[in-house]
Amino acid sequence: MSMGALVNVASVLSSIAVLVSVVYLALQIRQSARNQRSLIDRGRSEQVSQWLQFIASPDIAPLVLRGHKGEALTPDEHQRYVWCLYPLLLHYEDSFHQYREKMLSRAQYDSICSQMKDSARAPGLRAVWAEVRERFPDPFRAFADRMFAEPKP
């Protein structure tokens, strides 16, 4: 075998090795993205679970129920109600941004939208949103304004 033929064989082998490396790298990146999405999903689930356990506690649940109905609250109760709902609003905002960054699937996003529309049935939540909406960035604020609009009967 001549030196030229040996160089050609080495070049072909080198090209195959590069191709195999690129395919392997693509598979690793894909798996890493799946793992990242899985961690995000788990984190979202844990956040919501903790929040639900918090608002279901005997000390908090009556306040949240009264607040959701739009009943009159003392200034202290009102502030506590706002603090109870703020984590939920942050969760919605986080999910909105994660979807825009393609870190949430369409099904997950649709689920969040459904939850937001369901939440909008509570007059107290709509009132809290009107109170705190300026604290959120414009894209999410516009999105949430549509979700929290007065629901149709």
Image: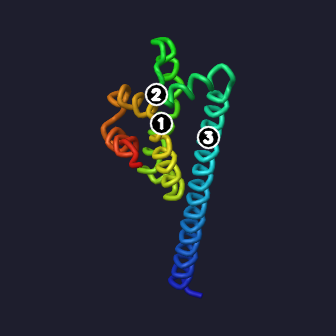
Placement of the N terminus among the 4 image quadrants: bottom right
Counting residues from the start of the chain, the first of labels 2 and 3 encountered is 3
Amino acid at pointer 3: Gly
Q: Badge 1: how crowded within 10 Å, few (<14), some, or many (20+)?
A: some
Q: Badge 3: how crowded within 10 Å, few (<14), some, or many (20+)?
A: few
Q: Residue at x 30, y 38 (%)?
A: 138
Q: Are marks 2 and 3 in contact (CB under 8 Å)?
A: no
On residue 70, the disc is 2
Q: Nearer the viewer, residue 126 or 73?
A: 73
Q: Which residue is mark 1?
A: 122
Q: Residue at x 68, y 25 (%)?
A: 57
Q: Residue at x 63, y 42 (%)?
A: 45
Amino acid at pointer 2: Gly
In front: label 3 or label 1: 1
In the rendered image, which quarter is residue 19 located in?
A: bottom right
- The CA distance from mark 2 to mark 1 is 8 Å
Amino acid at pointer 1: Ala
Q: Are marks 2 and 1 in contact (CB under 8 Å)?
A: yes
- The CA distance from mark 2 to mark 3 is 31 Å
For mark 1, give the secondary structure.
loop
Q: Which residue is mark 3?
A: 43
On residue 76, the disc is none
